[in-house]
Image (cartoon, coloured by chain):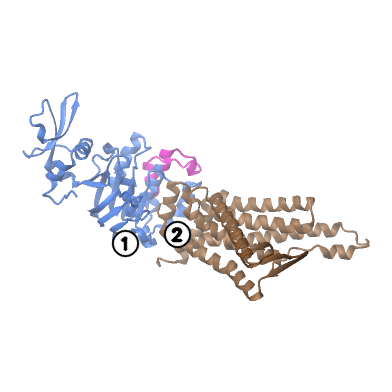
Amino acid sequence: MNDTFNLKRFGWLFKKTLLERPAQLLGLIGLILVITVLFYAILRYMGPWDVAQNGSFLIGFIGGGTFLASFVFTYFTSNASGSSYLTLPASHFEKWLCAVLITGVIFTSIFLLFYRAIDIAFVSIYHKALNPTGPFYKEMYEAINVLPYNGFIAGKAYMMFANFTTAMLVGALYFNKAAFIKVALIVCAIFIAGSYLNYFMAKAVFDNLDKALPYYAVFITVGKEFGKIILPSFASKAVDICILYIIPSVLLITAYVRLREKEF
Amino acid sequence: MIEIQDVSFGYSRKKMLYKNLTLTLETGTIYGLLGKNGAGKSTLLKNLIGLLFPAKGKINVNSFEPRRRQPSFLQTIYFIPEEVYVPSLTIKGYRNLFAPFYPSFEDEKFSQYLKELDVKDEGKLNTLSFGQQKKFIIAFALACNTKVLLLDEPTNGLDIPSKIQFRKLIASVMNEGRTIVISTHQVRDLENLIDRIIIVDNGSLLLNASLGDISEKLCFKTVSEVDDPTRVLYAEDTLKGISVVQENTEGEDSKVNLEQLFNAVTENPEMIKAIFSNTETLVK
């Protein structure tokens, strides 16, 4: 058998990973979906549609996905399970691929399908509750639609999902215990440090700087006027490619190398 | 065959646990790896399975380099750690998910070992007692028929009948192509089971000798009075007199007492080194 990848062996590993801890793994996915519905309902009750849709989507997809990513390598919380996992006769690549597939493909597919279903349900309830003879029926009907998966919010969510989940995969291989909290703190610290660094760099360039958003725009004030300078489109595209593809790829490769070199 | 060549290992770079360790373990042999708590027994076993990597030197297990943890290597070796991991699965569920990874796994033998070790098929494995979980993993490991079997404190948590059964099972599964290394600090559990003894302390290999060599070189007996204290490696007062371990200069025939041997070796490593220095049971 090939020592890097064997389809039959990968099938055993995948089956084992899913069925070994079904209550935790499948239960966690179920819990994420339930929390998403609850958030949708609560936010819808409390505020406007866009907040409910965007909020529940971001919390469920990014929050849930990140938490799940920290879970797929939780074998290292104890000596016994860590040893068992690392000495199981499957290649590092297969073990890595298994974790990536569960987080990146299976969870993403289930979540997007599920979210579309609940989104359709909520939007349909809203549409049916409208009075077709009312004065603004058409406008009110057309104002609310399901969240487009190719829209701005979804695009940003994919970007954050790709970065946070891959960071969590790496972190779970570095921190044997409380990986989720540790990685979340590190990501927050990097984000805050990056924002301040960006602000001071922008301040060095612009005299009347109001605020600066990393890799996106700076806001300046000239007299009583307020202006926004955004990145040129070629630079913006380069940054997007870097955040969406290059950083997650580097983190995924790091996770693989770390798994290969992991001592326990 | 397992070859450890000039291996150094430490949990920190400043403090090495093993320094330039060289050791060869032959196939068809059951090794007893003895040492005090923290002597480095588990560390050595973890280096052999590839859970830890040596800082220097080479380890070769049946032509594989353990640190690469290739599937073709891992399916020929089974490591039972001191604390075993059993998921929330039934015996059948565990077998179905884990056994396919081991091409030489034998279902019939597995059932037989479970029966012999008196492992009850009562629901999920993680609800069983620690001893039952350990016996289950031992049965599974033996049924995998791997060429190398590494057991770290396997008798911890086992009751007396289970320890006896464990010794019987290990003896029954031994064959010419297999290497078994049992690490323990409970030396009595290995009596009548092992062929060779390895004793480590403070990261050093103090002894690697067969029981035959040991009984040829050392004498274990009970005396009323110690004649020549300079020859005595270890002495212990007992009800029948003084149990001593001393160099066997007169070709006396005695049964090796593992506990006393262990104490003799750890208390007098230099004398042991001198006694065993001219045999192939080299002490490094």
**What chain is tagged by disc 1?**
B
Q: Nearer the viewer, residue B155 or B276?
A: B276
Name the residue rendered at 64%, 50% in the picture: A31
Give the class, few, some or many, for how many residues have Cα within 10 Å of label 2's Cα (few <14, many ≥20): some
Amino acid tagged 1? Phe
Q: Which residues are magenta?
A: B110-133
Where residue B280 appears, x then y in whole percent? 14, 52
Q: Is residue B75 left or right of residue A146?
A: left
Residue B204 appears anywhere in the view:
yes
Q: Is residue A93 left or right of residue B45?
A: right
Q: Is residue B97 left or right of residue B208?
A: right
Give the class, few, some or many, for how many residues have Cα within 10 Å of label 1's Cα (few <14, many ≥20): some
Q: Which chain is blue?
A: B
Marks 2/1 in contact by CB < 8 Å: the verdict is: no
Residue B265 falls inside the magenta stretch: no
Where residue A144 appears, x then y in whole percent? 81, 62
Q: Nearer the viewer, residue A184 or B177?
A: A184
Specify the farthest residue to the left. Answer: B250
Of the two numbered discs 2 and 1 in the rendering, the one whose residue sits closer to the viewer: 2
Residue B195 appears anywhere in the view:
no
| Residue under pointer 1 | B64
Q: How far is disc 2 from disc 1 in space, using C-alphas?
A: 21 Å
Q: With respect to residue B274, does A258 lie above or below?
A: below
Q: Secondary structure at mark 2?
A: helix
| Residue under pointer 2 | A258
Q: Secondary structure at mark 1?
A: loop
Name the residue rendered at 61%, 53% in the picture: A29
Colour for chain A in the figure = brown
Where residue B272 appears, x then y in whole percent? 15, 42
Specify the farthest residue to the bottom. Answer: A234
Amino acid tagged 2? Arg
